[in-house]
Amino acid sequence: MDNIQMGLFIAERRRQRGMTQRDLAACLNVTDKAVSKWERGQSSPDIALLQPLAALLEVTVDDLLSGDTAQEPARPLAPPPERRHWRQVAAVLFSLALLIGEIVCLICDLAMNAGITWSVFPVSSIIFAWLVLVPLIRCGRRGIAPALTMLTLLIGPFLLILAVNTVWQVFSVGIWLAAVGAAYLWGVYWVCQTLADRRRLAAAVVLALAAVAHLLIRAILAWTLDLPFLGAGDLVLLLQLAVSAGALFLLDRLRRQRGL
């Protein structure tokens, strides 16, 4: 089995089917970087993926392993399989559920108070959740970056709305905590994209980032609310994160040294 020949064959059939590397990866539940490595001949698909991959490319497993298009008769091209229909349905149902929730809150508020008072909180929260979560529901993995973008852009205005109707500390403290949280989520996203083929190392880095985020959050709370910086529970948590991250890092090093 020639990895380079197989990779060229996979790339050719994928393009003929009108699929991107991400489309193919989503169908096989792998990363697009894994597909890219296959097509460059740097690795080959796992044996368990050969049959579903061959079915997606409309070839036999033997064709896939040989990477030989010369013996393959012309096949009619068909459109890529429908994969996103259920996501669109889920997004519509999710939107309808949130819309019903908003209407119920507004009606109850108007009936009890003859105006809009407490319903500001659930309505703004529902709108915020809809804007952040719908990209994830509709696009799956490809919706992570848009969802994080919406979260980053909207968290400030959302906290401001809450602060105007409650106390200013909701914004003055919350905006710093939200900045740390958003930075952590972006960091996790970047790590998972960059280290997609080294999951143990990615998990170790994510745990290390969690420890840093926890320290920053405790520092913000100590600065803004005059709370103790670290307690016994914080130290135990940080120790657990450090030990877990170190263990995963060592496992990754051992795996690479053994070439597994």
Image: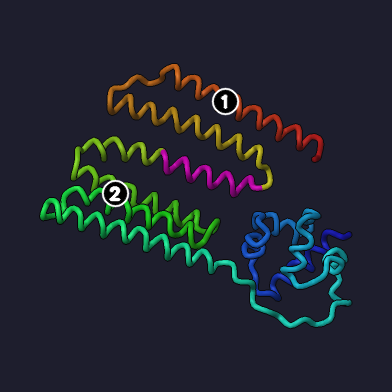
Over which residues does the magenta segment extend?
Answer: 181-196
User: Looking at the picture, does residue 107 appear above or below residue 254?
Assistant: below
Q: Is residue 247 left or right of residue 260?
A: left
Q: Nearer the viewer, residue 27 or 10?
A: 27
Q: Mark 1 points at which residue?
A: 242
Q: Is residue 187 left or right of residue 42?
A: left
Q: Does residue 59 appear in this view?
A: yes
Image coordinates of residue 150 in percent, x first then y, are 39, 54
Q: Mark 2 points at which residue?
A: 158
Q: Is mark 2 on a helix, strand or loop?
A: helix
User: Looking at the picture, does residue 214 appear above or below residue 163?
Assistant: above
Image coordinates of residue 11 in percent, x first then y, are 73, 67
Residue type of the residue flagged with mark 1: Ala
Image coordinates of residue 105 in percent, x first then y, are 24, 54
Q: Which residue is drawn at 22% across and 42% down?
A: 163
Q: Does residue 43 appear in this view?
A: no
Residue type of the residue flagged with mark 2: Phe
Mark 2 Cα-neighbour bin, 10 Å: few <14, some 14–19, many ≥20 = some
Residue 185: within the magenta? Answer: yes
The earlier-in-sequence mark between 2 and 1 is 2
Q: Which residue is drawn at 86% across and 71% down?
A: 68
Which residue sits furthest left?
Answer: 114
Q: Is mark 1 on a helix, strand or loop?
A: helix
